[in-house]
DNA sequence: ATCCAGGGCGGGT
DNA sequence: ACCCGCCCTGGA
């Protein structure tokens, strides 16, 4: 364990608030100075943007520079993506301006699966609370600057939890889902390493859907926000349904908008970048609501 | 108090 | 294929 610092200068398309509050992650919290602190693998990382510099400070075992480049997907050209998507229409162009510093993270697949199973019919404060309690109980403690942080439990660590333990941690009806999925992954009935090797997004999605608690929306979130990193998916939650209805479909009752219609529309308009388009639209709609 | 929050499941048509 | 009621929890 060691303290490290890494500074990015003149980086474009990197705004901590946009990245950490666009709904893709649950383990980052804002500090009083506006920076964000989160847990990535076995590291605690603080991200602070000052003018045109992003300062990363960490305490952990991994090489910070390598970790940051990988986790924040720094080798991807977001300027190019934004230029391309901005040409679609003025709605998307405006939402891209609003969330111009969004980057889609490469989050650990296992952690992303469990986190989004917990997210079902839940709200963000509760989701974060549950994940913190699971990490506190089954993860490992890291102490840094007088504060305690806990790593997200590994498959083996979480497999020690019984259904009752999970219920006590506040998971509610998601307890059995997390328990069953953990067991299935532990026993490699679904092999996460193998899943990374499959190129066909549809096949990966089919496999994810065999996991308890993983339906269409959760599967798409896992595909988009984890190291699987697929942009040809379009997670449809209440906010995305709302924004797509408001902008294009204009049905009087947004709850009756057909998912298939939204999927078709997204594919037509945004093509293979529909996943990233979804993030700009989601962040804009929810943040200005 | 009732409702809802970043859905999924199981049992109906 | 669609549709619907139900599922824990806690904050408004």
Image (spheres, coloured by chain):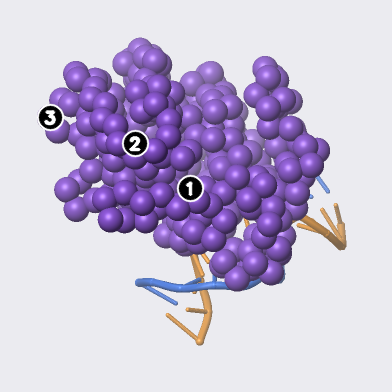
Chain colours: A purple, B orange, C blue
State whether residue A212 is above or below residue A236: below
* A43 sits left or right of A133 in the view: left
Give the mark nearer the N terminus: 1 vs 3. 3
Give the mark nearer the N terminus: 1 vs 2. 2
Name the residue located 38 percent from the left edge and 33 percent from the top edge. A280
Residue A274: x and y in percent read 50, 25
Residue linked to disc 1: A151
Which chain is mark 3 on?
Answer: A
Q: What is the secondary structure assignment of the residue under circle 2? A: strand
Residue linked to disc 3: A51
Residue linked to disc 2: A2
The answer to whether residue A234 shows anywhere in this view is no
Name the residue located 22 percent from the left edge and 31 percent from the top edge. A55
Residue A82: x and y in percent read 35, 19
Front one among A145 and A198? A145
Q: What is the secondary structure assignment of the residue under circle 3? A: loop
């Amino acid at each position: 364990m060691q303290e490290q610092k890494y500074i990015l200068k003149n980086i474009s398309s990197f705004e901590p608030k946009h990245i950490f509050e666009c709904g893709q992650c649950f383990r980052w919290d804002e500090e009083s100075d506006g920076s964000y602190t989160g847990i990535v693998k076995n590291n605690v990382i603080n991200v602070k943007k000052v003018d045109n510099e992003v300062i990363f400070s960490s305490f952990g075992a991994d090489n910070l520079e390598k970790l940051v480049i990988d986790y924040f997907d720094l080798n991807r050209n977001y300027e190019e993506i934004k230029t391309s998507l901005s040409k679609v229409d003025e709605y998307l162009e405006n939402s891209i301006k609003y969330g111009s510093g969004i980057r889609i993270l490469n989050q650990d697949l296992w952690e992303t699966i469990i986190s989004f199973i917990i997210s079902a019919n839940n709200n963000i404060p509760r989701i974060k609370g549950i994940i913190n309690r699971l990490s506190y109980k089954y993860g490992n403690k890291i102490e840094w600057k007088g504060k305690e942080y806990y790593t997200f439990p590994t498959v083996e660590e979480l497999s020690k939890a019984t259904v009752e333990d999970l219920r006590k941690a506040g998971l509610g009806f998601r307890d059995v889902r997390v328990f069953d999925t953990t067991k299935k992954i532990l026993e490699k009935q679904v092999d996460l390493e193998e899943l990374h090797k499959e190129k066909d997004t549809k096949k990966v999605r089919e496999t994810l859907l065999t996991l308890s608690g993983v339906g269409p929306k959760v599967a798409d979130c896992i595909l988009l926000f984890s190291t699987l990193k697929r942009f040809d998916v379009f997670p449809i939650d209440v906010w995305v349904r709302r924004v797509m209805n408001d902008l294009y479909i204009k049905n009087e009752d947004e709850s009756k908008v057909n998912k298939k219609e939204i999927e078709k529309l997204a594919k037509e308009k945004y093509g293979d970048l529909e996943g990233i388009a979804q993030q700009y639209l989601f962040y804009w709609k929810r943040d200005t609501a």
